[in-house]
Amino acid sequence: MTAEVRTIKTAAEQALAETYAKAKGTLPGAGTIATLRDAAFRQFDAQGLPHRRVEEWKYTDLRALVRDAKPLAAPPDASAKATAGKIAAPFSALKPRQLTVVDGMFVADQSDLTAEAGLRIGSMSEALVRGDALVAAHVGKVFETADPALALNTSLMGDGAVIHVAAGTQVARPIALIFAGTQDAAVFTRSLVVVDKGATVTLIEIHESGSTQVNTALELVAGEGARVDHLKITRAGALHLSTLLARIGARTAFNSFAFTRDSTLVRNQSFVRFAGGNTEAAIGGLSLLKGKEHVDNTLVIEHAAVGGVSRERFRSVLEEQGRAVFQGKIIVAPGAQQTDAKMLSNALLLSDDAEADNKPELEIFADDVQCGHGATAGALDEELLFYLRARGIPRQEAEALLVQAFVGEVIDSLPQDSLREPLMNAAVEWLRARG
């Protein structure tokens, strides 16, 4: 006799299934997009929320951490839209072109849609409805992965931004994508950025939410000889799942940095394929944690062509019962000779109750490469503290100086001076809040 084995679905998984069943008829896009949604939800429904027995999610068990799934957010009111307009203030000196998404909806009247040669900007939901060719060519196709969080985003994706930078265009002002969550609800945003051959753009993502559950994804395609500088800043009071999917062309410069603070439960996951030869990339992040905050930075970097150079560098500062997770995998495909890839994660623990989990990996299928990884976790150097205190500096101030030096080193790795000052100011603000 054989017994039938059935997976018991959690309350959150059941609620997500009900949400999709009710919403699927009203979500933007038909035809191939609707088919894509159905396939993605079947995949998620089969897998369920990721848990500790899923290797890539072993340190961030969503099945245990997420007890309920909130309903989809309603359209934002005028007050919510006005609040979102202030989020980009730390970057006002850069005079960015601001695009605003509030409670999962692209808000045109809070966005700078001024015409600029070689630059096209629009709403993802509108693009899905009209069957936009750029969206049809790339959404769901930039990087293939069976990740359940991404599958859930694909099935319920609503709105976001579509940005197309034409070949040879140098976008003068940074583009600031503002995502604000103001409701006790759930949002599923999806954005697409396509940067054609020889074009240049700086993209700043800023996510701020209170009790909103966020599942967001950004697909990025960079053509041959392009340059893309990408900065993501997150402050989230509830669950925040973020996925970056990137395909990088030959002789392209790509820089991406994730800064996270004051966030309850965050997972930043990146899937990056260097599809063309002789690319140069720097991918990094900084997480500042306190209380019981949990931040997970997970990345898969695939070198699929010759001569690629990449540097992955992440740091975290933890106090009280904060928990930082870093999982990084570098894959060097067969034929990707002369790859030079280095990955490093450093965690600074300011409390005996803090926890840092580091899991760097290499999968190398070529023989002419230089690859390496490292990870450290430790407390402040007592000798340096003694040195500072012997010169009359109080212990708390001495600690702050050492922490500031620790975070400053990774912030200084950003390629643009104009992006460093706002991040350093935010880090200093966090240090001051320690008391």
Image: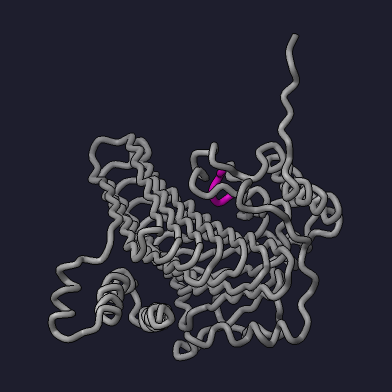
Is residue 204 within the magenta segment? Answer: no
Start-end of magenta stretch: 141-145
Q: Is residue 11 above or below residue 99?
A: above
- Characterize the magenta stretch by its predominant secondary structure: loop
Question: Where is residue 296 shown, x and y percent of the image?
Answer: 48, 56
- The answer to whether residue 120 shows anywhere in this view is no
Which residue is at 71% across, 62% downward? 132
Which residue is at 72% across, 41% downward? 45
9 with respect to 404 (left or right):
right
Which residue is at 74% across, 17% downward? 3
Question: Where is residue 331 shown, x and y percent of the image?
Answer: 38, 42
Q: Is residue 248 above or below residue 97?
A: above
Check the picture and name the quadrant holding the C terminus.
bottom left
235 with respect to 308 (left or right):
right
Name the one closer to the observer, 134 or 43: 43
- The answer to whether residue 185 shows anywhere in this view is yes
Q: In the orientation shown, which residue stands out farthest toward the top?
A: 1
Name the one closer to the observer, 164 or 429: 429
Question: Where is residue 69 shown, x and y percent of the image?
Answer: 73, 56
Is residue 142 within the magenta segment? Answer: yes
Name the one closer to the observer, 383 or 283: 383
Which residue is at 28% across, 48% downward? 373
113 with respect to 206 (left or right):
right
Check the picture and name the quadrant holding the N terminus.
top right
Asked which colour scheme the image uses, the reply is one colour
Question: Where is residue 123 shown, x and y percent of the image?
Answer: 69, 71
